């Protein structure tokens, strides 16, 4: 059944795949635009900070403790009742499986009790479709997803239709930022702290590598950069504040160069696949999209390459449930729902037909 354009849809979204417990209510209007009615995100940063990274068991337990509360708040802030909700969407993967189970089971319980359709959403699709919620970006477009868990270039062809151009063959970029922060004693999560420290640093003091630069594919690698940074830091012995600033600036500049080179290649690939597209768009999403150097690099590249850069507002680039509700709404509008048997998945590639990236430890 195709329900498109027959009635507005009101969707409850639930997100719990990493360390944010989130719920949101989103309206999909008759003209296909979206309105966020509430967007509750409870960060667990403080619980994980002492360990320098997300501890899956702590995350799952915190989701259990907070989820009901967060869902109730999302409804309250939207000034809606259960009778107003048309469907419930939850992240079913990829992510930390304990957390995914908590969110998906909550959604299934709501769907069962309220007799509502369930949509089991791919978290990456949530990121991928956000630009349609915030700016109505039309298919197809190029997506650069740069988060703590993923670094991918995709062509978003349609709802549920993705062509992966590249992925990281080792660390995600956000993860590399976080490991840099940890090494330099800047806390967790450390991307923003690295950016702050880099502001006063000299990016050219240390000769850091730009892995995979110039390669014909669109894959990323940050492990060699991370190792080179560690060696440079260890070579200095004790680190002064200017040392830390220079190391952060060097790391950030190398990361931006990698992003520029890989995104340029992806723009070429997009044009090969869509030679007649007159106004191509590149969307950047994920927590690292907050980084001003990364954004400025992409802005310049897009300008040079005839692309328009679109970056959703920061609170919708990082993990949230509005993007999950919206992805659910896009599927529901196409009559596409899931059964209560939908499985939580630790791994769930957006493009199942994509060739595996080379190397071990691929997180696609
Ligand atoms: O998308 P996100 O909120 O969660 C994941 O799905 O991973 O991304 C979080 C990541 C973290 O690795 C964090 O350090 C990074 O985004 N991040 C940044 C900045 N703000 C957040 N990285 C670089 N510069 C920033 N300003
Ligand atoms: Zn994410």
Image (cartoon, rainbow, N blue to C red):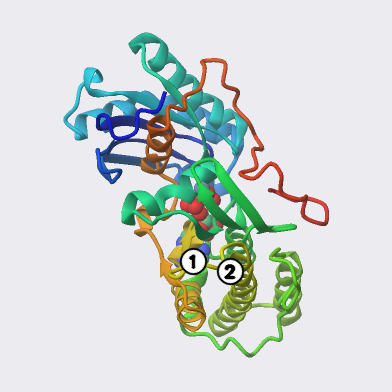
Figure quadrant of the N terminus: top left
In this view, 239 is above or below 166:
below
Residue 309 location, quadrant: bottom left
Q: Which of 210 and 200 lies nearest the eye of the viewer? A: 210
* Numbered label attached to residue 271: 2
Task: Say which residue label 1 marks.
Answer: 277
Tell whether 345 sits left or right of 293: right
Q: Which of 359 and 326 lies nearest the eye of the viewer? A: 326
Q: Which of 19 and 337 lies nearest the eye of the viewer? A: 337
Residue 3 location, quadrant: top left
Tell whether 113 sits left or right of 31: right
Residue 213, percent from left and from top: 72, 77
Residue shown at the point (61%, 57%) measured from the top left: 152
Q: Which of 171 and 3 lies nearest the eye of the viewer? A: 3
Q: Disc 2, disc 1: CB below 8 Å? A: yes
Residue 312, percent from left and from top: 37, 58
């Amino acid at each position: 059944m195709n329900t498109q354009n027959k009635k507005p849809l009101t969707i409850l979204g639930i997100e719990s795949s990493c360390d944010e417990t989130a719920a949101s209510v989103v309206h999909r209007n008759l003209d296909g635009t979206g309105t966020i009615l509430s967007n509750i995100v409870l960060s667990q940063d403080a619980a994980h900070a002492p360990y320098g990274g997300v501890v899956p068991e702590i995350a799952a337990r915190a989701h259990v403790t907070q989820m009901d509360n967060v869902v109730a708040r999302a409804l309250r802030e939207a000034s809606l009742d259960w009778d107003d909700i048309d469907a419930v969407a939850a992240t079913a993967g990829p992510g930390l499986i304990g957390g995914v189970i908590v969110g998906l089971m909550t959604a299934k319980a709501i769907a069962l009790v309220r007799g509502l359709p369930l949509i089991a959403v791919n978290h990456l699709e949530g990121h991928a479709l956000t630009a349609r919620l915030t700016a109505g970006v039309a298919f197809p477009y190029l997506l650069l997803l740069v988060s703590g868990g993923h670094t991918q270039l995709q062509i978003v062809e349609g709802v549920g239709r993705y062509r992966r151009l590249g992925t990281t063959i080792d660390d995600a970029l956000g993860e590399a930022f976080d490991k840099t922060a940890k090494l330099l004693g800047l806390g967790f999560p450390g991307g923003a702290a690295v950016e702050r420290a880099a502001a006063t640093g000299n990016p050219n003091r240390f000769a850091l590598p730009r892995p995979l630069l110039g390669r014909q594919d669109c894959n990323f690698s940050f492990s060699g950069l991370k190792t080179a940074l560690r060696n440079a830091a260890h070579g200095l012995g004790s680190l002064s504040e200017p040392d830390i600033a220079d190391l952060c600036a060097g790391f950030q500049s190398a990361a931006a160069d990698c992003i520029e080179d890989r995104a340029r290649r992806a723009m070429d690939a997009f044009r090969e696949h869509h030679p007649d597209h007159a106004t191509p768009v590149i969307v950047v999403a994920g927590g690292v999209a907050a980084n001003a150097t990364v954004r400025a690099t992409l802005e310049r590249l897009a300008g040079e390459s005839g692309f328009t850069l679109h970056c959703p507002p920061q609170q919708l680039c990082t993990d949230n449930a509005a993007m999950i509700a919206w992805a659910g709404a896009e599927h529901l509008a196409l009559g596409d729902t899931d059964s209560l048997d939908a499985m939580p998945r630790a791994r769930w590639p957006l493009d199942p037909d994509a060739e595996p990236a080379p190397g071990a430890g691929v997180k696609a």
